[in-house]
Amino acid sequence: MSLLLLCVSLFSGEHHRLMKTVSILPAHCHDHTTSETLIFTTLLLSRWAGWTRPHLRGKRERCMRACVHLYVCSCMCVCACVSNLCFICRSLIFQKRWVMLDAQCLRYFQNEKEVYSKRIIAIRFVTEVLNVGEQKFEVVTRNRTFLFRAENNTVREEWVSVLKETIQQRRSSMEMSLMNSLISKQGYLEMNGLRSKVYVVICADRVFLYGNAEEHSQGVGITYIEMNVGTVKSTDKRSFNLTTFYRTFSFLAESAQQRDQWVEALQDCVSRSLSSDVVAQKIWAVEANQRCADCGAPHPDWASVNLCVVLCKCCAGVHRGLGQSVSKVRSLRMDEKVWTDNLIQVFLLGNNRVNLFWAANTPPSEALQPSSDSEKRQRFVSAKYCQGKYRRYHALFGQQEALNKALCSTVQTDDVLETLSLVFCGADVNCYTGDPELPSPVSVAQHYGQILQVEFLTHNHNTDLPGSRAGNHTLLEAALPVSHTGYLFKTASSIRPVTECKAKGDFSRRWCSLNQGNFSYYESEKSSSQSGGMKMSDVLCLLVNPPGKHGYAHSFELYHDSGRVYLFGEDSSDKVKGWIKAIAKALVPSAAEDLVCWPFARVGRLSYTEGQSHHSPLLGWFSLGGSRLLLLLHGADRVENIDLRKIKELSMEQEAGAGAGAVVLVDGGRSLRVEGDRRPDFQGWLSGLQQGSGRGDGPLDQQQLTDTDVPVIVDRCMSYITQHGLKSEGIYRRSGVNSKIAALLFFLRHDARQVRLNEGERQVDDVANVLKRFLREVGEGVFNGHQASLPWLHTTTVSEMSERVSQYQALLHSLPRVNRATLGAVINHLYCVQCFADENQMNMHNLAIVFGPTLFQMDGTDNSAGQVVEDLIQNYQDIFNVDAEQFQRQLDMISHVIKAQKEHTEEGSPSPLTICGVYLERKEEGSELLVQISQEVSAEELVCKVLRRRNIPPQQGDYWSCFLVDNSQEIERPLHYQERALTIYFSLGKDCHLVVKKNCYMEAILTYIAGRVDVSRNGLIKFCEEKGQRGKGTFSRRLCVLSGLSLRLYKDVKSSQPERECQIHALKVYCGIKRKLQPPSCWGMTVVCEKAVRDIQQWYLCCESKNELIEWLATFMSLQHDGDLWPAASRLDS
Ligand SMILES: [Zn+2]
């Protein structure tokens, strides 16, 4: 018998990033169980005999592939016997095997190409690792010992130390109990090609194969199958296939029913493996979180984020039934967004410690078991959390003020458990601290840097306290300072917004009471049982209707969390006002009181995100009236005030089908994304915001406005004429094309901010007529209605010009702000137009004839209208009190614009601008720039814009580029200079952003390409392909050929068929490979191959040196862009 090499790869879990191939010599195992030894020996001998008999050689392949267990293990057992007594081989037999160690198992494979092992030894069953003689070491489990031999002692030492370390780590963690609790099914199955059955164990997202049940209990098996690469299908009555990329396992169950159970369990396992368990693993790190907090069932993968308990699927279902206001249920696997590091930290308190509070007084008779029926579960969960029946009462229980005070001081410490106990014994999360600087417990916690306290409080902003429901323990209610009673008229609640007018007959009289945060109504003052009501914390929004909307003159609506709308009315304005004031105060937290101290139309809470952040939405309080929006964002200490007419952008996002929607509001350099669903309250906010942000058909002060209070429509038209029409003969007198004027005016009225007027598309005369028509038709006109305009006309009868001027000044001051600003802007514009009368033939008089009737909204018969306008133009600087120097600057600028216009004959950008957020150098606070760009803007132009904005002079050799950075993948891609920046911006996924920074490879890339005649490259590269979402890659060597139109990967140099192939143009090449995959070097590329929308493959290619990487990148880019990698005309020139 020849000695065979045992080949070993050192590959140890998360802690060792080195990957090594070393050789180990012989392996064998001692079997301590005599009976087992005997059985094995017998089995063995027969097999061994078969081995050596020539006519059985043909079966060898079958044995190796299928009888994994017997072949390897028996061989080892023979050796074990031999060392004592065996007469067949009389020496130790070592076979060369590929051995892998990860955090959970030591496995060995036939060779390094095999995916499925021949033997797997669970690390948690390994009791010892011992050096034995030269080059050898033993891995000792409870029942067996495995002997390995390395190529030399150094390698052996390495193995032994890594193994020992791994064992140590496994022991300290709670792996053991966890692994067993993760088993979802186990049992014997027949496997195709095997004579005896295998023992199959489905554990978490893997399927383990053992020779028998005993092997399983000893932690020594054949192999495991990662189910993220698996699919399961029934094939026949009792049989089913488990197919992976590498192999198909065919199983036969005892019955069809058994088969169905296996298939279902395996399919569950596949979906489990495809969902992420990153969060679950972190939370299970605390042993107590490995059992459901309510029933004790193993591997709970749900949680209530406000009650701080980890739950099983069944209990989570019951929790969900209690409603969001009691328990906010989230999945550890699916709701990744909600699981911020802080929230995970809070959960590390552990079910046991949290239950010290929640379940302190649970009588054993009432305790739940994993097997408890749903009725019992329901009863228990409701008693535990809704009534707080089993909780440990806080010493301050019942003393509201003392509780609040204790809360305010506890949140300054890191004792979240005490906070939990206070809050669920009645302390008010939204109480006023007495300190105007830090008004709420949340702001206190924030101030003291207690982020976990902040996290906990945030999730309990609106939680119903135990006992506050169903009148069980009513004394707990956080005392709200507001109470109000009286008669109101109420209609039946509805699930739709009330759009139609409700007659008095639709209302019924109810005695209403607002007290202790509860709004309830009764048949009459004397009724003892209420006919309905709601908790104020369940009210999302209060809407005040305009007078006269319904039969009762004054009315308001309450929008409930359930989606129902309640309408109340009353004829007396004072009574309704009283109710609105009281309800509004009871609705908002004390810090948001400013929100309700003005004549708002709508107040309530909404969830939102800010900027490009993809964090989970926060809760903010908003109140809206007309074009004014007040908001108190999460954690903010003051109320903000936004004039919706002046915001930069307001757009609606409606997700098809899903029912969710969002409104994005861009204002003064930041963007706010308010999210909502189909419930009526959000729909109401949408239309309210839309109306408030400016209506093209409204009067001047309801239009979209510029910063200087001029309607955007007026501003757009005038600046267009200033740029393109000042020298146009007969401007404002000539008529345009009627259909074009009507269309343009329609779009401007719809959303003026989105419309850009550009030469070529719009004729100056059309635009001029749009302005005139708008001014002529706008509600009430510039002079604020007919009555108010009469004194202006009358002023023309004053003969003394100076007297007229002072009268005009007085009248001007009596105009509302927007009218005054608009009139000023129009006259300023007309003054500029007449400055160019030599060319456009429109002197003051001519302009006055046109604009008199337009501005006064009358026909041309009254000459005094024209006279007023002529006076205003002529005395523009006096009447409007214009700073002479400033005005001169304006005129100079116009001349400059016109001059520049002549030189620059190209057309401008014809499409609307969008604001996009870009970071300079890296993503961090303060490095974000908001840049307005159009659809056509290239990455290069975007880079220039950013550099100009930050006053960074581009220098030769800097190679500033725009990068698409993907944080979650830890990769980045420099955009090609001609790529459309907006297209990329809109396609950015979660955790992605754009960064402008220097491209440190560009110089080397250009140099490399310049020196090449033929652009193609082939060479060896380390390749890995990720299947599903699981991490852990295996990089193996491939021949990579990059030429012409495609990228091809070959298994080895001799292969004639490529193993992988993709069109170059379907590739996106990113620099970097995520660390989780443990790439063999830091010179990696992630290649995304999009064959179709749903068919996206991701390949990881890893080079050995930076130069190699640069050459590959250069070749990729050059092939993709025909060698055009960098703009010829450098930005230095511009
Ligand atoms: Zn449970």
Image (spheres, helix red, strand yellow):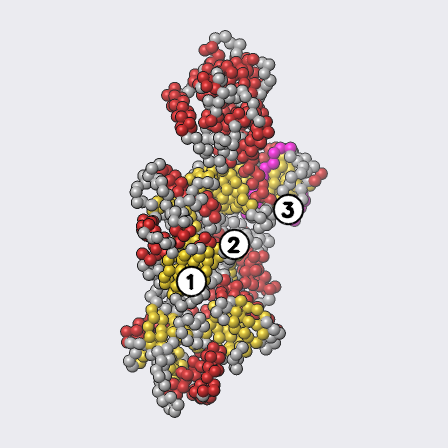
Decide: is 1009 above or below 508. below
Q: Which amino acid does the dot numbered 3 rest on?
A: Ile
Task: Give yes or no for contact between labels 2 and 3 (Cβ–Cβ under 8 Å).
Answer: no
Asked whether residue 257 appears in the rendered view, the answer is: yes
- The local crowd at label 2, few if under 14, some if 14 to 19, many if 20 or more residues have their Cα within 10 Å, is few
Q: Front-most of 1099 and 413?
A: 1099
Place of residue 219 in the rendered image (x, y in percent of width and height, measured from the top left)? 44, 76
Labels 2 and 1: the sequence-earlier one? 1
The quarter of the rendered structure image containing the N terminus is bottom left
Determine which residue is flagged by label 2: 1093
- The local crowd at label 3, few if under 14, some if 14 to 19, many if 20 or more residues have their Cα within 10 Å, is some
CA separation in Å, label 2 and label 3: 38 Å
Q: Which amino acid does the dot numbered 2 rest on?
A: Val
CA separation in Å, label 2 and label 1: 22 Å
Q: Residue at x 57, y 60 (%)?
A: 318
Q: Where, by quadrant of the figure, is residue 278 drawn?
A: bottom left
Determine which residue is flagged by label 1: 1049
Nearer mark to the viewer, of 2 and 3: 2
Query: For the image shown, how many numbered marks are present on the structure?
Result: 3
Place of residue 655 in the rendered image (x, y in percent of width and height, measured from the top left)? 56, 47
Decide: is 610 above or below 722. below
Decide: is 418 above or below 1134. below
Asked whether residue 886 appears in the rendered view, the answer is: no
On the rendered structure, is 953 left or right of 371? left
Magenta residues? 523-548
Determine which residue is flagged by label 3: 495
Q: Which amino acid does the dot numbered 1 rest on?
A: Leu
